[in-house]
Image (tube, helix red, strand yellow):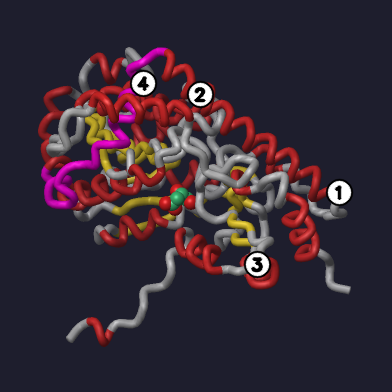
Amino acid sequence: MIFKTLSPAPPDAIMGLTEAFKKDPNPQKINLGVGVYQDDTGVTPIMECVKEAERRILVSEKTKSYLSIGGAPEYRAHMQKLMFGVDHPVLRDDRARTAHTPGGTGALRIGALFLKQVCPEATVWMSTPTWANHPGIFTATGYKQAAYPYYCAETQGLDYEAMRDALKKVPAGDVVLMHVCCHNPSGIDLSDEQWREIAGIAADRGWIPFLDFAYQGLGDDLERDRVGLLRMAEAVPELFVAHSCSKNFGLYRERTGSLTVMASTTSAAEPAFSHVEKTVRVTYSNPPAHGGLIVTTILDDAALRGQWEQEVVGIRDRIKGVRTALVRKLAEQGVARDFSFIERQRGMFSFSGLTDEQVAFLREKKSIYIVKGGRINVAGITSANIDYLCESIAEVLKPEP
Ligand code: LMR
């Protein structure tokens, strides 16, 4: 017997919080854990453009037969244009190949499995801190891991010099995982200039960038958020991109992501992608169709596409508004600490600076759920819960009498 000997696996650092939140009977409870957008009424809405696309699909869809291993060609072409921009030289030269994957997590996992086959001795380098699921994905693949500095707690900003110096020492052939925009969990991104310099280091050293691009459109806008990818694509011959439509199309449970391999030539892209397809085939065979069909329906139609872009602006603006309100309300509560850095962070998350003890207190005594390390999902804050949240944070920060 094997099951009887097993002790339970620890709860997931992010998804586990939602499970605990659901069971909490406190009517004032707030879930600021998982990165899922909510509107000001606390609902994760289906975008209007998504609803309209689904209506059209219901009428026009003709089959539920399998997709090809890499997914529908239309979706894959749209993803390349969304990520690189229409008419990018990499696309013109046909150097990229994209597979529709079940979410960004599926893309990371397929990329990791592929890498384990082609360069099994390489180490993957991750920022300190990084998304809580990154180490697990690469551990599950048997990858060696190392860390490079990223966030500076003192300045609540990027530890740029330390990061740059560490990346200068990464050996050729190793893999460096980077967040293209809206760094998860810190909300701190590189500037265009900094991306340029890091891309130059990648090219000089010969390490391979693996870009996690899960929040396109939630930082500045769809174009400016891709600057990290563009700088890397200009500088290096090969890279990976794990992209997600979970947040910018609100398609979380439809598992709509993609893995792109960019090769130095079109003839190198072809065999590389055949290995990606082999990996997909033995992992989940071929992707789920519905999310990709929704995205394709929206991006194929000028009016729906325009509506989608407006809805992304709405999400981004609400999150920015919440950041401002949070800083103001904390000050109104008499919190002495300067929280203005929250307004400088980008995307869904704010690295609040709360300690693990304070996070535990807020969960146990106030039913406020925050990821260990102090990451707050700003999009979970609403007009109805912001006062209770700020009072509770003020209480936890109160100096000892
Ligand atoms: C998050 O970081 O909360 C999201 O990316 C959701 C997840 O899968 O963890």
Q: Tell me the SS state at disc 1.
A: helix
Assess disc 3: are there few (<14), some (14-19) or many (≥20) residues with their C-alpha within 10 Å of its C-alpha.
few
**Is 208 placed left or right of 368 in the picture?**
left
Q: Which residue is mark 4?
A: 299
Q: Position of residue 306 (x, y in %)?
A: 47, 17
Looking at the picture, tell me which residue is in the foreground, 168 or 295: 295
Residue 146 sits inside the magenta stretch: no
Assess disc 1: are there few (<14), some (14-19) or many (≥20) residues with their C-alpha within 10 Å of its C-alpha.
few
**Mark closer to the chain start, 2 or 4:** 2
Assess disc 2: are there few (<14), some (14-19) or many (≥20) residues with their C-alpha within 10 Å of its C-alpha.
some
Q: Residue at 45% x, 59% y: name it.
A: 15
Magenta span of residues: 278-302
Split into 4 quadrants, where in the image is the C terminus?
bottom right
**Mark closer to the chain start, 4 or 3:** 3
- Label 4 CB, ligand 1: below 8 Å? no
Mark 1 and mark 3 in contact (Cβ < 8 Å)? no
Q: Which mark is residue 26?
A: 3
Q: Which residue is mark 2?
A: 224
Task: Give me the C-alpha separation between circle 3 and circle 2.
Answer: 41 Å
User: Compared to 247, does 191 lie above or below?
Assistant: above
Q: Which residue is mark 1?
A: 332
> Closer to us: mark 1 or mark 2?
1
Task: Give me the C-alpha separation between circle 4 and circle 1.
Answer: 44 Å
Split into 4 quadrants, where in the image is the N terminus?
bottom left
User: Compared to 148, does 311 lie above or below?
Assistant: above
Assess disc 4: are there few (<14), some (14-19) or many (≥20) residues with their C-alpha within 10 Å of its C-alpha.
many
User: Compared to 145, does 93 lie above or below?
Assistant: above
Q: Tell me the SS state at disc 3.
A: loop
